[in-house]
Image (cartoon, rainbow, N blue to C red):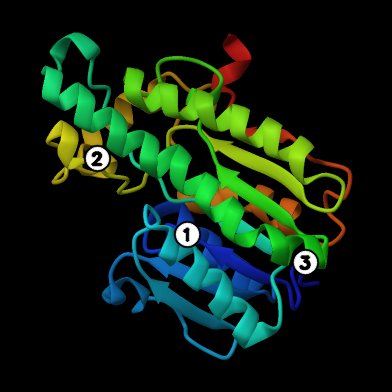
Amino acid sequence: MQMLLNRRVIVTGAGSGIGKAIVERFLQEGAKVLAVVRKPEQIEDFLTNENFCYVVGDVNDYATNQSAVDTAIEKWGGLDAMVANAGVWDFFKKLQKMSAQELEDGFEQIMSTNVRAVLMAAHASYAALEDSRGCFITTGSNACFRPGGGGPLYTASKYALRGVVAQLALDFAPNVRVCGVAPGATDTPIGGTDGLNQTGKSMNKDRERLESMGKHIPLGRVSSPEEHTDLYVTLASAKGARYVTGTILVSDGGLSAGQ
């Protein structure tokens, strides 16, 4: 049985990694999905049909978020779930290793993508989600709850995101549920920012780093993006999580169990 049959969904950061896996899984589950990507070529791997469309843009621009919502409403008549998934990493950059300029620029860019863009997605989608009694879902991290998942800028952004989920759950109640999924170490090409001089880097280019991360996880490995999608499906479905709001579901292979 398709758990998301005819559910109308937007997924940001859909061009690769967890976002791409969410889009593919949601389409398999019968959803109508609008993917927000940074480059047109990022949609080439998707099986395009009447249940799929996309918007090209930067989630740091409010207009991109509004365009995605407007397009979904125009094409499908409404919106049932908004998945604010786009994010950037800081590759464990320590504060004491940053220049003053890197601190200023890196903080602004990481907080913009990981927090401000989520707020813009929520603002742009709220009215449509209220009409459908839908849900807003964001992608957090194990760094929402514990240090060690990145450097201080990334960790600060994810702790802030945890507060955003909690507050919006109160503000959007009772008609819109607000939740998150917190993946642990995942084999994805998540990148960095130019403010930290990390635009050419991606997490899964460094296979030794991923292997090292896996040794600290009780399940003994880093995850694939697809392994997190069950939780997104449950949260986005009409009946899977009707009484769940204000929480971030952890998908970290047991890493937090040892804390």
Q: Which residue is mark 3?
A: 3
Assess disc 2: are there few (<14), some (14-19) or many (≥20) residues with their C-alpha within 10 Å of its C-alpha.
many
- Residue at position x 56%, y 76% in the image: 70
Chain-order first, disc 1 or disc 2 = 1
At label 1, the amino acid type is Thr
Which residue is situated farthest in the bottom direction here?
50
**Left or right placement of residue 197 versus residue 146 in this view:** left
- Residue at position x 29%, y 38% in the image: 109
Q: Which residue is mark 1?
A: 12
Q: At numbered mark 1, what does the secondary structure look like: helix, strand or loop? A: loop
One can see residue 90 in this view: no
Residue 86: x %, y % from top left? 43, 50
Kindly identify which numbered label has been placed on residue 192: 2
Is 190 placed above or below 52 here? above
Q: Are marks 1 and 3 in contact (CB under 8 Å)?
A: no
At label 3, the amino acid type is Met
Query: Disc 1 to disc 3, how far (Cα)?
Result: 20 Å
- Residue at position x 72%, y 57% in the image: 236
